[in-house]
Image (cartoon, rainbow, N blue to C red):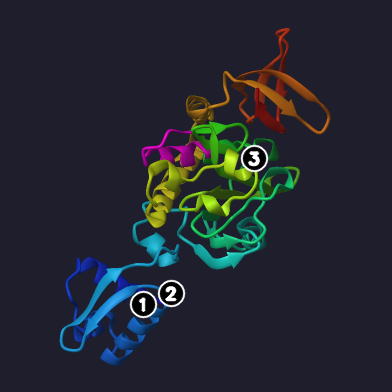
């Protein structure tokens, strides 16, 4: 959206439903009444409902349920995360595009799409990404060693869970990268790293949230294991407002990550965890074993205790509750 259109929308929003004349809009934005009319027509084409009267002017009736960058920026409270936004109606995946942009992008840049054609979860699993969801990737460039890169998944999990709980749902974290409500998956996190031996070049944190997704869009077994914010709350959420809150929470946790001992975030993760205390079956590329999840290490490994009392730290694997 051009800066002039952004200014027009902001003025109409700030008018609180009152009519603003074309002349007044032109004077405030610094363009002619004819150009005001052209921008209004363009905004209508983009989904904004704007009523017009020849003698009185324009009034904003509603905004589209789309994740336009200007809509997100208008109420953004974060100072780093989300200042640069790449928006697409449809993408292969936001992580793929974010990685293509990452080397030249500023830290905190996000990529957001209305639809992902080939969304991915961990281990290359398919992630269904229809309209109504929140499909987003955040580009981060922390000055850390590769061994600590996995901590960003924990950071994101804490932040997103906090944002969801503000909606009134009992969201919790399932190790390693899922967020559940009532035992069903509502969000997945896919963290991908580009690094050298000594340092991380960038980290892309992919976030997939079943926000206003219609449950009928899910097929097969997915219907039994997944849920949406819409179905849990009982009505569609304001996706733009939620993204603004989520990006703020991500930034707050990221500031802690960069400036404070990691034990603080680790304690938060444990307090929000659904996994600690569960009997679990863990599947790794090398073995399958069962035990009780009793903790998590500083780098995100799940601590599993077998029936004999022997403990093992699992850095990656499939975790199924017994």
Tell me the distance, in whole angstroms, between the alpha carbons under discs 3 and 2.
35 Å
Q: Position of residue 180 (x, y in %)?
A: 52, 36
Where is the N terminus found, in terms of image quarters? bottom left
- Which contiguous range is marked in magenta? 157-171
Q: Position of residue 75 (x, y in %)?
A: 34, 57
Q: In front here: 181 or 6?
A: 181
Where is the C terminus found, in terms of image quarters? top right
**Residue located beneath label 1 in the image:** 5
Q: Residue placed at 39% from the left, 67% from the top?
A: 64
Tell whether label 1 touches label 2 (CB within 8 Å). Answer: yes
Can residue 153 be seen here? yes
| Residue 276 lies in quadrant | top right
Q: Which mark is residue 149?
A: 3
Q: Position of residue 35 (x, y in %)?
A: 33, 89
* Residue 160 within the magenta-colored segment of the rendering: yes
Q: Position of residue 177 (x, y in %)?
A: 60, 38
Q: In front here: 242 or 70?
A: 242
**Residue located beneath label 2 in the image:** 1
In the rendered view, tell whether residue 157 sits above or below residue 29: above
Mark 1 burial class by Cα count in 10 Å: few <14, some 14-19, many 20+: some
* Residue 128 within the magenta-colored segment of the rendering: no
Mark 2 burial class by Cα count in 10 Å: few <14, some 14-19, many 20+: few
Mark 3 burial class by Cα count in 10 Å: few <14, some 14-19, many 20+: many
């Amino acid at each position: 959206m051009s800066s002039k259109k952004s200014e027009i929308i902001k003025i109409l929003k700030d008018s609180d439903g009152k009519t603003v004349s074309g002349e007044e809009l032109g004077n405030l934005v610094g363009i002619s009444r004819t150009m005001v009319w052209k921008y209004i027509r363009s905004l209508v084409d983009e989904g904004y409902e704007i009523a017009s009267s020849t003698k009185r002017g324009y009034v904003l009736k509603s905004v589209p349920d789309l994740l336009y960058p200007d809509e997100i920026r208008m109420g953004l409270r974060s100072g780093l995360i989300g200042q640069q936004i790449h928006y697409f109606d449809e993408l292969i995946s936001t992580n793929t595009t974010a990685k293509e942009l990452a080397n030249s992008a500023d830290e905190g840049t996000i990529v957001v799409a209305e639809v992902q054609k080939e969304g991915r979860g961990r281990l290359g699993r398919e992630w269904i990404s229809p309209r109504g969801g929140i499909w987003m990737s955040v580009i981060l460039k922390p000055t850390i060693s590769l061994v600590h890169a996995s901590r960003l998944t924990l950071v994101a999990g804490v932040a997103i869970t906090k944002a969801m709980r503000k909606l009134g749902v009992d969201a919790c974290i399932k190790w390693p990268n899922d967020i559940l409500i009532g035992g069903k998956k509502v969000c997945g996190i896919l963290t991908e790293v580009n690094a050298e031996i000594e340092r991380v070049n960038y980290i892309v944190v992919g976030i997939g949230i079943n926000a206003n997704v219609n449950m009928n869009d899910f097929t097969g077994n997915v219907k039994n294991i997944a849920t949406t914010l819409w179905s849990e709350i009982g009505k569609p959420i304001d996706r733009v407002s939620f993204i603004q809150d989520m990006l703020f929470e991500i930034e707050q946790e990221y500031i802690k990550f960069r400036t404070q001992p990691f034990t603080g975030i680790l304690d938060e993760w444990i307090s929000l965890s659904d996994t600690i205390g569960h009997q679990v079956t863990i599947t790794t590329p090398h073995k399958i074993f069962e035990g009780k999840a009793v903790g998590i290490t500083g780098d995100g490994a799940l601590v599993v205790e077998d029936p004999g009392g022997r403990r093992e730290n699992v850095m990656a694997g499939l975790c199924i509750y017994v």
